[in-house]
């Protein structure tokens, strides 16, 4: 972990959730994320936010510091960290090690929080105590086998459980989710029960610099409880690197053509692996089992 500098804006606030926001360039995306954060977050249940700023430059730094002070003014503790890793995992591991709250949530600067997002995710974790890890993102109907969702009769939300083993061969080719790895582990946007996971965090810290998250889930997290994906999609949750539905973004007041231009520019600059044609691609896979 290559840390350039760090400083704390501490308050005495206690809460159920620590949030990690990872940023790397893409200032326009970052602004959308923080706008959604301030608009849709119930800060009463937030204890601390860790902002990890990788490869800082003047413009991004000025903006992020301004947001850190806005958060502090709301009574939320903030830890701001500048790094030089050119990778997501080191900052993620560092922030997870700082978490003292019951839950730890990670969000990158390409996912805009939707309506009551934090309440939805915490509520799901509290309602299904078997859950130890819950992934979230914008999910399209054709990607998700609804008949396999775990959902209590009295609730209108639940989760798709990940399978216990890594998918291989024909099983992977015929799985009911696209991409298939959604049936084995969750992505980087997730909320975790730290009361159960905290004793295992040292195992992830000892894994590779660039990898380790999926292996950590399979080897350390799954034995502790269920791993799954939140369902249904949180209203207003926007994945800025996945532009499948123009109307979803336009309903949120975002300029879809501008987003396409940004994805294309970020990819050419090497700030994202996502190419525009992939961002626009619609999947057609549906449940087959």
Image (cartoon, rainbow, N blue to C red):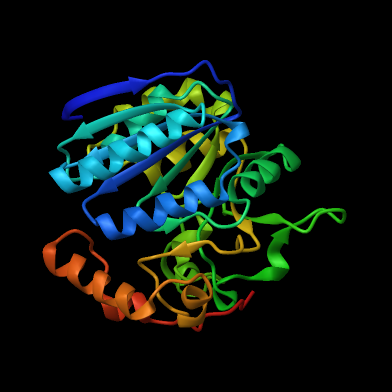
Who's the residue at 16% across and 30% down the image?
2
Q: Visible in this render: residue 57?
A: no
Q: Residue at image x 65%, y 63%?
A: 232
Q: Nearer the viewer, residue 143 or 253?
A: 253
Residue at 18% across / 48% down in the picture?
A: 59
Relative to 30, say whether 74 is above or below. Answer: above
Residue 31 pos. (x, y %): 35, 54
Q: Which quarter of the figure has residue 145?
A: bottom right
Compared with 86, 256 (above or below) is below
Q: Quadrant of residue 10?
A: top left
Residue drawn 60% across the image and 63% down it: 233
In the rendered image, the residue lying farthest to the top is 12
- In this view, the residue in front, 110 or 75, is 75
Horizontally, residue 152 falls left or right of residue 141, namely right
- Residue 110 x/y as whole percent: 36, 57
Q: Quadrant of the C terminus?
A: bottom right
- Asked if residue 85 shows in the view, the reply is yes
24 horizontally vs 158: left or right = left
């Amino acid at each position: 972990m290559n840390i350039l500098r760090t400083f704390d804006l501490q308050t005495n606030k206690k809460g159920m959730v620590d949030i990690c926001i990872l940023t790397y360039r893409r200032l326009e995306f970052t602004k959308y994320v923080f706008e959604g954060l301030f608009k849709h977050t119930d800060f009463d249940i937030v204890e601390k936010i860790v902002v990890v700023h990788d490869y800082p430059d003047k413009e991004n730094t000025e903006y992020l510091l301004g947001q850190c002070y806005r958060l502090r003014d709301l009574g939320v503790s903030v830890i701001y960290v500048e790094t030089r890793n050119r990778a997501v995992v080191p900052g993620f591991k560092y922030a997870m090690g700082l978490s003292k709250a019951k839950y730890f949530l990670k969000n990158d600067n390409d996912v805009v929080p939707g309506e009551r997002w934090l309440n939805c995710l915490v509520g799901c974790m509290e309602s299904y105590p078997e859950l130890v890890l819950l992934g979230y993102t914008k999910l399209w109907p054709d990607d998700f086998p609804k008949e396999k969702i775990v959902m209590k009769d009295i609730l209108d939300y639940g989760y798709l459980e990940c399978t216990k083993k890594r998918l291989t061969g024909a099983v992977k080719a015929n799985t009911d989710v696209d991409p298939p790895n959604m049936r084995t582990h969750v992505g980087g946007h997730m909320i975790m029960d730290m009361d159960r996971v905290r004793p295992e965090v040292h195992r992830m810290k000892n894994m590779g610099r660039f990898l380790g998250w999926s292996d950590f889930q399979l080897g350390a997290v799954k034995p502790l409880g269920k791993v799954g994906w939140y369902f249904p999609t949180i209203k207003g949750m926007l994945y800025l690197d996945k532009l499948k539905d123009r109307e979803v973004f336009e309903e949120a007041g975002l300029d879809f053509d501008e987003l396409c231009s940004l994805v294309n520019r970020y990819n050419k600059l090497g700030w994202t692996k996502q190419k525009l044609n992939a961002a626009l691609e619609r999947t057609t896979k549906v449940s087959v089992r």
